[in-house]
């Protein structure tokens, strides 16, 4: 027969986001609360490091679909990172969640679409045709249609629709610079500007910035742009085909890849009375060859240049060579840890030089003059189609924070180096009872461990308030004592392959029903429990997830008398989630959970072990009916949860859910919202509205949550 269970905190749902969706979370297990709903969620991003094709696309005639990459780093607590990708037909923008091919302009006052387009293109030339294209892009066919438009979507390639040959986001001025085979463009967030008059229709191969100076490498020389003035540089160089630029802030030098001549170094003049100082490194100096392309300066001031068959490295004393046999080096980039990313036709290498590590830098400083150099303990890691990438041919690479982006034959790919997540949750329980010390707290943290998966740690606390014991004869209060429960533990999730993930949670719990009561026997218990979960991504169809979890596997507990044992709330949880809408500015997720507590007593009134209760409870003799009726009544002993989450522009989330519990006589509608204020911080709120025949004791209960990513 069915039995009642102890340790209610094991069943107390957590997470303001999930509680705003009717307590749905088994298949939507993608934040730090996954440890409660389904530890298998720790096997996937954004909780775990993962590889993914972010934007599948094939180029034409063997050319890459994505040519160049640039990013805006997160430069404040409330700011978000952004990524721009050059294509063969303009640019695309990644806002942290979705790829956009348009720029949004909000019409104000009596402004029309034509006014927004005029500002965007920066001139009257071709305005009629541009306006026609924008109206078509927004589905506007008449004046009546236009009267309903508030936000105008303007295609990013409306003005610049050529192949992107160079791209740079200038953090200081928040401007995007774009190079094409026919010249240079700048976008300031509102208007595009062409620099055809200043530079001409030269092919722009490279861009670099130094404070207020923009360096521009073209197929016809090097130019600088500062305070609206363009100046040609490097006419003394033997060749003028500039393929790469890199500014060294520590040495105040510009390194220039001069195709056909080698690598040039420029020390810019400091005043109008001064002169630029040039020097040129060739193969006689140790440079790999005279045809360098991409060039970067790492965090230690060392210079790295790409060539067709290898890499040149300038360690500030001499040039060294790194050969890639039977291979082509296409691009170089440096991450914030000082590692060099090398994109080739046979995958990507991540090279962390010994001098870029803390121990290596210390050894370099402590080295005595004339002391022999010790063999470097450099770190090399190769990523290819066998361990993450979908294709070996990588045209461009760009680290952005913890992530790394790759342009490959199959489109835009990324390696998501998962953030640590820290979540806090609070709710005042049963507000209609007005008991201030009846509340629920939860805190959790997830720690990704590279390809191994993710670890998580959590603490769940419920205060049941104070109880006053009175003398039955005198009605005098004798003693007041508090009751509380605390559950803590850790979780681990990892992938099994083919979209399957598995997770395990180990929990320790302590329950004290008589804290502060020194006049009678203590009512406390301490024990353990486990959860096991499975999660399948893309079940049968794309974007459909399935979850199966068995919660609270563990022994029975007792408080005072061992002969009076109670089982802990062994529970099956089934879940489904479907990404119904995944547009650039709009995302809609639907979810459903079914939770069934399966605790049983044997014929002697003792709790059955979990491996018996887990199955026997579905056919409990105490369930009314027979055949299909009995099955239906058995299923109806569980709790049904459905919910939805709508996210706009990866910034605002609206949530709605419904919970039905026939056994517990609960029917609740949940409402919630969230604000993603930056890449780092998220605030969530949820509340309950009881409906139907519910007793109303949870009506108006409010939940608050904070989520930090770092």
Image: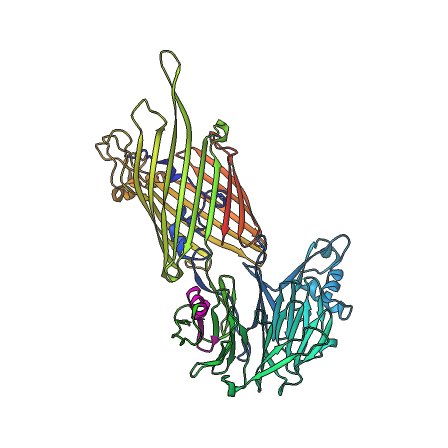
**Is residue 346 covered in magenta?**
yes
In the rendered image, residue 503, in percent from the top left (x then y), is placed at 35, 53
**Where does residue 56 sit, x and y in percent of width and height?**
51, 68
- Rendering coords of residue 249 (x, y %): 58, 69
Is residue 176 inside the magenta stretch? Answer: no
Residue 389 in view of the camera: no
Q: Is residue 403 left or right of residue 548?
A: right
Q: In which quarter of the view is residue 215 placed?
A: bottom right
- Residue 27 position in % (x across, y down): 43, 51
Q: Residue at x 78, y 54 (%)?
A: 110
* Residue 534 in view in this figure: yes
Q: How has the structure been colored for display?
A: rainbow
Residue that appears at 47% across and 33% down = 429
Q: Which residues are magenta?
A: 343-365
Residue sitting farthest toward the front: 369
**Residue nearest the observer in this picture, 561 or 62:** 561
Q: Is residue 586 left or right of residue 545?
A: right
Q: Is residue 483 left or right of residue 311?
A: left
**In the rendered image, the vertical position of residue 16 relative to residue 76, given as above or below:** above
Q: Vertically, is 402 above or below 159?
A: above
Q: Disc count in the image?
A: 0
- Judged from this view, the residue extending furthest toward the top is 474
The answer to whether 107 is drawn above or below residue 441 in the figure is below
Say which residue appears at 45% left-offset and 39% top-offset.
Answer: 441
**Quadrant holding the N terminus:** top left
Q: Residue at x 26, y 44 (%)?
A: 611
């Amino acid at each position: 027969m069915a039995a009642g269970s102890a340790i209610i905190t094991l069943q107390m749902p957590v997470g303001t986001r999930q509680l705003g969706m009717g307590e749905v979370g088994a298949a939507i297990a993608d934040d730090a609360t996954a440890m409660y709903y389904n530890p298998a969620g720790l096997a996937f991003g954004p909780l775990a490091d993962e590889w993914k094709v972010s934007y599948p696309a094939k180029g034409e005639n063997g050319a890459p679909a994505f040519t160049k990459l640039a990013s805006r780093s997160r430069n404040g607590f409330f700011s978000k990172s952004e990524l721009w990708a050059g294509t063969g037909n303009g640019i695309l923008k990644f806002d942290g969640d979705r790829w956009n091919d348009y720029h949004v302009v909000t019409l104000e006052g009596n402004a029309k679409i034509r006014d927004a387009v005029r500002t965007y293109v920066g001139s009257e030339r071709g305005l009629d045709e541009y306006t026609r294209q924008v109206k078509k892009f927004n589905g506007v066919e008449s004046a009546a249609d236009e009267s309903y438009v508030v936000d105008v979507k303007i295609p990013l390639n409306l003005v610049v629709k050529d192949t992107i040959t160079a791209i740079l986001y200038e953090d200081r001025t928040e401007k995007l610079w774009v190079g094409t085979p026919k010249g240079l463009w700048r976008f300031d967030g509102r208007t595009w500007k062409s620099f055809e008059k200043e530079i001409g229709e030269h092919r722009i191969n490279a861009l670099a910035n130094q404070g207020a100076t923009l360096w521009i490498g073209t197929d016809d020389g090097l130019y600088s742009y500062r305070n609206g003035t363009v100046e040609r540089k490097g006419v003394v160089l033997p060749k003028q085909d500039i393929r790469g630029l890199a500014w060294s802030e520590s040495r105040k030098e510009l390194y220039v890849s001069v195709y056909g001549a080698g690598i040039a170094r420029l020390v810019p003049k400091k005043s109008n009375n001064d002169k630029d100082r040039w020097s040129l490194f060739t193969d006689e100096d140790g440079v790999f060859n005279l045809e360098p392309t991409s060039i970067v300066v790492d965090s230690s001031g060392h210079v790295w240049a790409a060539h067709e068959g290898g890499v040149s490295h300038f360690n500030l004393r001499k040039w060294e060579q790194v050969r890639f046999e039977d291979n082509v080096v296409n691009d170089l980039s440096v991450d914030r840890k000082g590692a060099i990313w090398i994109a080739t036709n046979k995958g990507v290498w991540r090279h962390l030089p010994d001098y870029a590590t803390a121990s290596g830098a210390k050894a370099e400083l402590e080295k005595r003059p004339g002391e022999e150099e010790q063999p470097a303990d450099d770190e090399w890691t190769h990523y290819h189609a066998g361990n993450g990438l979908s294709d070996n041919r990588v045209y461009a690479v760009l680290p952005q924070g913890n992530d790394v982006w790759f342009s490959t034959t199959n489109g835009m790919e990324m390696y998501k180096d998962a953030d640590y997540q820290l979540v806090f949750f609070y709710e005042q329980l049963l507000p209609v009872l007005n008991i201030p010390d009846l509340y629920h707290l939860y805190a959790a943290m997830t720690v990704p461990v590279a390809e191994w998966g993710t670890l998580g740690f959590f603490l769940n606390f419920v205060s049941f308030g104070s109880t006053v014991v009175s003398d039955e004869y005198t009605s005098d209060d004798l003693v007041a004592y508090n009751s509380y429960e605390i559950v803590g533990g850790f979780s681990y999730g990892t992938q099994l392959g083919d979209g399957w993930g598995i997770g395990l949670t180990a929990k320790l719990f302590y329950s004290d029903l008589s804290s502060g009561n020194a006049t009678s026997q203590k009512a406390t218990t301490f024990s353990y429990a486990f959860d096991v979960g499975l999660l399948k991504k893309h079940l049968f169809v794309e974007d459909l997830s399935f979850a199966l979890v068995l919660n609270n596997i563990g022994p029975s507990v007792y408080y005072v008398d061992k002969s009076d044992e109670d089982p802990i709330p062994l529970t099956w949880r089934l879940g489904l989630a479907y990404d119904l809408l995944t547009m650039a500015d709009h995302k809609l997720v639907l979810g459903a959970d079914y939770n069934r507590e399966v605790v049983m007593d044997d014929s002697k009134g003792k709790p059955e072990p979990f491996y018996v209760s887990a199955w026997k409870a579905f056919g409990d003799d105490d369930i009314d009916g027979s055949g299909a009726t009995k099955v239906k009544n058995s299923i109806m002993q569980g709790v049904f949860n459905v919910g939805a989450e709508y996210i706009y522009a990866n910034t605002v989330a609206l949530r709605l859910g419904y919970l039905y519990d026939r056994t517990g006589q609960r029917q609740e509608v949940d409402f919630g919202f969230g604000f993603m204020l930056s890449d780092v911080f998220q605030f969530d709120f949820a509340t309950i509205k009881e409906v139907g025949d519910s007793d109303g004791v949870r009506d108006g209960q409010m939940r608050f949550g904070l989520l930090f990513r770092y």
